[in-house]
Amino acid sequence: TQLLEQSPQFLSIQEGENLTVYCNSSSVFSSLQWYRQEPGEGPVLLVTVVTGGEVKKLKRLTFQFGDARKDSSLHITAAQPGDTGLYLCAGSNNDYKLSFGAGTTVTVRA
Amino acid sequence: NAGVMQNPRHLVRRRGQEARLRCSPMKGHSHVYWYRQLPEEGLKFMVYLQKENIIDESGMPKERFSAEFPKEGPSILRIQQVVRGDSAAYFCASSLRDRGDTQYFGPGTRLTVL
């Protein structure tokens, strides 16, 4: 089983601040996905990164895949209360099994 | 809404009863995956099915759990003789193709075993 560790486990910030969430593994993945999950709902895909060193931007969200394809980060600029949620990373090795981290619970206070 | 549908959204069972969880994949998707999420844990892969076939059930407990995806109708995850440890959120996902294709998740079924 390939393990993904996410840090921090919890993060509470004020509206307008920036935040970074990390996803680390000792294993190499062919791709890595970031999901956001709201209470009582299923995970919603935010982005997929596949190339080592890749950086993807989605409005105020910036995703980076490490050069060795073992780690990733999610950076949110000027966080808003609507960014509140559980952020999950999931790795894949070009197969159907996604290995999920335990997630980071982000709370953005107005 | 053409997304993945799951029902029921909440299910309460007493120990020893059976739980049946249903999943209708996105339109046109023939690949279905079931995951289980325990409190403060990530989602864990349980089983991967294509129409009428179980492809990989390596993440599913050997006893009491079974899954099917018939030619017609939704995919069913069945848990017999439930125990308190089965309490969790069960998510279904579907994809258009296999092997690395994007998986779209349903809203989940929250199972509570009393």
Image (tube, coloured by chain):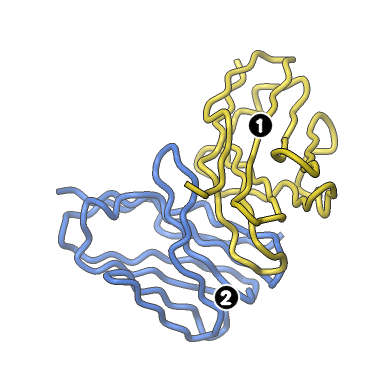
Chain colours: A blue, B yellow
Q: Residue at x 80, y 35 (%)?
A: B66
Disc 2 versus disc 1: nearer the observer: 1
Q: Which chain is indicated by disc 1?
A: B
Residue A103 or residue B104, whichever sits in front: B104
Question: On screen, B98 above or below B52?
Answer: below
Task: Specify the amino acid type for callout 2.
Answer: Lys
Residue B73 appears at what percent x and percent y? Answer: 72, 38
**Within-10-Å neighbours for mark 2: few <14, some 14–19, many 20+:** many
Say left or right for A107 vs B12: left
Say left or right for B106 vs B28: left
Quarter of image, res B88: top right
Secondary structure under the numbered disc 1 in the rendered image: strand
Say left or right for B24 vs B9: right
Residue bearing mark 1 = B21
Q: Residue at x 68, y 71 (%)?
A: A93
Residue B27 or residue B113, whichever sits in front: B27
Residue B59 appears at what percent x and percent y? Answer: 76, 48
The Cα atoms of the two marked residues, 2 and 1, are separated by: 35 Å
Query: Disc number at residue A70?
Result: 2
